[in-house]
Amino acid sequence: MKMTTFFIVGLVVHVVFFLSIFDIYFTSPLVHGMTPQRVSLPPPAKRLVLFVADGLRADSLFKPDDNGTVRTPYLRSIIEEAGTWGVSHTHVPTESRPGHVALIAGFYEDVSAVAKGWKENPVEFDSVFNESRHTWCWGSPDILPMFAKGASGDHVYTYTYPQEREDFASTDASRLDTWVFDEVKVFFSAAKNNETLLNQLYDEQNVFFLHLLGIDTNGHAHRPMSKEYLDNIGLVDAGVAEIVTVIDDFFGNDGKTAYVFTSDHGMTNWGSHGAGHPSETLTPLVAWGAGVQIAQRAVSQNFDDFYLKEWGLETYRRVDVNQADIAPLMSSLLGVSFPLNSVGVLPLNYLNNSQHFKAESMFANAIQILEQFKVKMAQKKETTISILFTPYQPLSESNQMDFVRHARELIQRGQFDKAINYCEELIAQAMQGLSYYHTYDRFFLGSSVVLGFIGWTSYVVLFILKTHASLRKPPTNTDLVAERSLLGTFLCLGLFVALFLAVQSSPWTYYIYCLLPVLVWYTVVKEYETLAGLIRSIPSLPLSKSFGYFLLVMFGIELLVVSFFYRGMLTLGLILLALWPVFSGLYIKAKFRSVSWMLSCLCLALFPLLPVVGRDPNVNYVICAGVLTPLTSSSFLWSSWKRSPLIRDRQLFFCQIMQVMLCAYILTSTHTSLQLKQGLPLFNQLVSWITLASSFFVPLFGSTRLFHRLLSILLSLVCVYLLLSTGYEALFPPVLSWLMFAWINIEQETMNTQGRSNRTELSSVDFAENIDISKIRQLKLDDIRRSYFFVFFIIIAFFGCGNIASINSFDPASVYCFLTVFNPFIMGGLLMWKVLIPFVIVMCTFESIQVSTRLSSRSLFLVVLVISDLMALHFFFLVKDYGSWLDIGTSISHYVIVMSMTIFLMVLSIMTHILTSKRIIVGQKRKMHLR
């Protein structure tokens, strides 16, 4: 197989492995075709008002101030006198879209659906709004449209403010909530003179939804402990009290309005959300009005936390729920059908109604979830060969009928408490059954992917051995006959697998996941001669050295895997790397470069021990980086120009150094302006975007000498990184670059100690020179170490300043030099580029080492590929069942990160191979011409 073909095939294989994790673990839980279920008894409420305070933490609402003053007097009075309260437990990821879907539709949206769209429904699902007669919504243009589009009919009406109002640099983000309250008051005032609207408002089963984004915006901009955030909570409390008065007056205080106040997610102390910290997953829930239980006193309450005393609410009954339970609660109060895809369980302690009504509501809730189970079971039964189908035994068809009949009999006999308990048991069984059928094919697909993964890794190892270990052997006639028979065997196996999948009407992706291992293992088995040659050469190998390298690599891979869970392990790894010159003997022969390597490793080792970025912003670090980078760059240029003066690059480097200092000033200026609530200065914004755009092509105007080109790239990237920094992470690229320059130098020393006659002086290395193929060497055992160093530094680049597997690991304030108006895709893109900048620095260094050590880039990439594939396979085995949501920080997210890194490396390998091949061809032609 040609090298280009190999890399392209490898890229396809890795893309399949990458996508497989979503098909195996993140398929949509939604099913369709269920019969709607509702309670036949009269509902307690004619209308329901839902307040969602975006980004409101439970403790921020419930906890009094330090002086004992309650910041939400109206809601506090509801808790103590008129309603029921508790904590709503959200699911990861704690973001606005999935939080609102759980609240209003009653299910936890799968992660792939979130990636398909932010404002509109990427998948069809039912909701309380859809089941209502009319729904009026006021709030953010990022949330409301996704419930309006896809609703059956035109009964969901939305009123949103312009996108530009969602400005983190706003002088007062609470204006967003004031806008909502004012618009609602205007709406009811205008309805008095609009007969059509008036008739609609007096219909039953109406919903009014007020989405309040100001708290979330202030939390991001000023942190949850800030005066702005806490004052915004007080404003919301006063606004809720005013809206309740307006609505009650409008309907003549008929007592038929139910109110629910809650939040979609919380927020960390450093102003971010997305992960599973209690400050993000614990949100408040307060309900009152028609059909809601009034405040109940409690003598003692047992909870895992100690918040009750801290909040001063230990004597008031607390009723906690899962976030999805709020949807069936609203459905029961209104008397509408439960959302068809809801997995929420009705919290009966919130209802103030007869036991008969509660029993009927629980029965409808149980049947609604059982309907989903039936559809799921039917779908799986249709796509599985009957003799292979294994049903969920606790809910066989006969057991289902027995459950339903017995529950209905208990209700008819008036044994409501027993009926409620029986329905709760049915719900628990149905939920387990849903999970069973949702994960029915998981083991089968996972096994196929693991087989393919092991096969591919085995093939790469054999490919390396065949290419670099002189194990090639000319094919004989016997080999050709054996290869044809082998091809026939695997073709028959592939046809059998395809037929098996066709009989089961499996999705087309199943064919890829199941046939790919057949193809991969065919290529592995076809290389049996290489494997036989390796076995024959074992006696001549330096077994002790090879085994030692094997143990070191395995230990190194385990260290990398553990570092994904514990960043501090990277510090241990860097300390061990710092000692490498001592153990290898390089320290004796190159003391200055060894000391530079050791000091840079130890300095970089400090970063994984620090808190993740964003928790303690401090622009003084950015100023330090803005001064340190020009000083070190200037000193390096001064020393290098003495050896090889490059007059034409002086102006470029001078401009880049000045640009670094300008970017540090822009960051501090923007920070000061935002603190003074003067907004983002236009000049700062223009400079930031121009710097970002120019960073991609400015280094191309400089010299192609190794160190000069690397320095130009570094300065361009540091400029952008400074603009995206908020604290100590601004120092990370300079320190990482120091280590990378030390790595290049010390690798050159290893070539000297090994007596390479074809080594090149670093000062004379030019990226633009054509490659003399006669000077390209074969892989050695020492190249395994180089490849491991590269993978280790890539992980350091990713995790040195934070955990990129966690959404809340980076401060959204990082992008304020570029924009302050909420735009998730642009902000996410900028943060992603911030993550990739250290990655690019390491990549450029690795390419430089390949050039300076005269090793083909594709050869080293093959070893890197094996190491990264072993890591990904390790994470795949560690993957556990986390339901339908991506638990940030788990093995699944780490697997995705490693696979993304590997795919990126594969693309880069293809590009590098094509460019290198052209340079080799040109070099060969020039050499022939000289002869």
Image: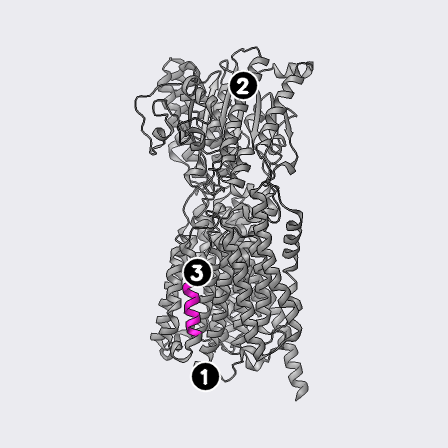
Residue shown at the point (52%, 14%) measured from the top left: 256
Residue shown at the point (45%, 83%) measured from the top left: 755
Which numbered disc, 1 or 3, marks the residue that appears first in the sequence? 1
Q: Looking at the picture, which amino acid does disc 1 mark?
A: Gly
Q: Looking at the picture, which amino acid does disc 3 mark?
A: Leu
Q: Residues within 10 Å of mark 2 (few under 14, many from 20)?
A: some
Say which of marks 3 and 2 sits in front: 2
Magenta residues: mostly which secondary structure?
helix
Disc sitting over residue 615 in the figure: none
Q: How is the image coloured?
A: one colour
Q: Is residue 115 above or below residue 849?
A: above
Disc sitting over residue 244 in the figure: 2
Work out whether residue 176 or residue 410 is closer to the camera in this orientation and state it.
176
The residue segment tinted magenta is 593-603
202 relative to 573 in the view: left or right = right
Percent across and percent down for residue 754 are 44, 81
Q: Secondary structure at mark 3?
A: helix
Which numbered disc, 3 or 2, marks the residue that appears first in the sequence? 2
Percent across and percent down for residue 747 are 47, 74
Going by the picture, which residue comes out furthest to the left?
Answer: 300
Say which of marks 2 and 1 sits in front: 2
Which numbered disc, 2 or 1, marks the residue that appears first in the sequence? 2
Work out whether residue 925 or residue 350 is closer to the camera in this orientation and state it.
350
Image quadrant where residue 175 sits: top right
